[in-house]
Image (spheres, helix red, strand yellow):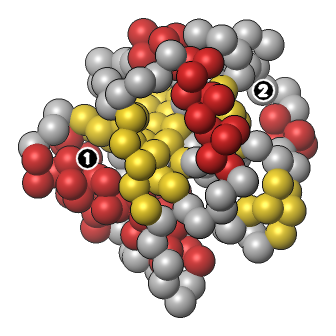
Amino acid sequence: MKLNVIKGNRSERIPLLMKELETQGITNFEFWRGIYLPSVKASINAAHKQIVEYASVAEFDEVCIAEDDCKFSGSGAWDYFLKQKPKDFDIYLGGIFLGDPDENGILKNFTGLTLYIVAKRFYETFLSVDPEEHIDVALNGLGRFVVCQPFVVTQYDGFSSNTGKNETYETLQRNRSFFGG
């Protein structure tokens, strides 16, 4: 499966990302430029949607997207993520920050689109959400969301374009199970 990576303008992330891809053995990937609009929410929203729009036009059965600050939880996490992919999902996530999965990994609400797969049947819904909202928040309640358990990704600590400040994700990772951890 090809991994489509949203590459922002943060050049310091690229060496870390390339190491992550190499460690996971991911050779089939493509970079997509970030989109910069007056609002951060709209920029992130549009950056994710550009890839889903492309997949829709190309009539792909599914599309896999990652952000450039994704951090895999251990060697083999990518393969584990792919092997655990459920048959029935609208979005299959590699991990989340907020949200409470049930015993089958099914979520009603979540935040975190660090690594995920969107099914073709959900493209139209994905593309229709409010472009001025945080895209993950706008999607809540609109589909069948399943998160890989244990989680396979988080994000590198550092400056968040989303919040406009330096972030650490330790508190959001508490009480979560991670592959290889």
Q: Is residue 91 visible?
A: no
Inspect the image, locate mark 2, and give the three-letter code of the amino acid beneath it.
Arg
Q: Nearer the viewer, residue 131 or 22?
A: 22
Q: Position of residue 43 (x, y in %)?
A: 49, 74
For image coordinates 38% across by 35% down, the residue present is: 29
Q: Does 11 appear above or below 118? A: below
Question: Which residue lies under the disc numbered 1?
Answer: 122
For image coordinates 79% across by 13% down, the residue present is: 181
Callout 2 crowding tier (Cα within 10 Å): few <14, some 14–19, many ≥20? few
Question: Which residue lies under the disc numbered 2?
Answer: 176
Q: Which of the 4 image quadrants contains residue 125?
A: bottom left
Q: Is residue 123 visible?
A: yes
- Circle 1 sits in a helix, a strand or a loop, which is it? helix
Q: Does 5 appear above or below 117? A: below
Q: Is residue 147 left or right of residue 4?
A: right
Q: Is residue 47 left or right of residue 112?
A: left
- Circle 2 sits in a helix, a strand or a loop, which is it? loop
Q: Earlier in the sequence, mark 2 or mark 1?
A: 1
Callout 1 crowding tier (Cα within 10 Å): few <14, some 14–19, many ≥20? some
For image coordinates 89% across by 40% down, the residue present is: 170
Q: Circles 2 and 1: CB distance less than 8 Å?
A: no
Inspect the image, locate mark 1, and give the three-letter code of the amino acid beneath it.
Phe
Q: Does 2 appear above or below 96? A: above
Q: Position of residue 80 (x, y in %)?
A: 52, 11
CA gap between label 2 and label 1 equals: 27 Å
Q: Nearer the viewer, residue 119 or 75?
A: 75
Res. 161 mark: none
Q: Position of residue 4 (x, y in %)?
A: 39, 42
Q: Is residue 79 left or right of residue 53?
A: right
For image coordinates 15% across by 38% down, the residue present is: 60
Picture quarter with the N terminus: top left
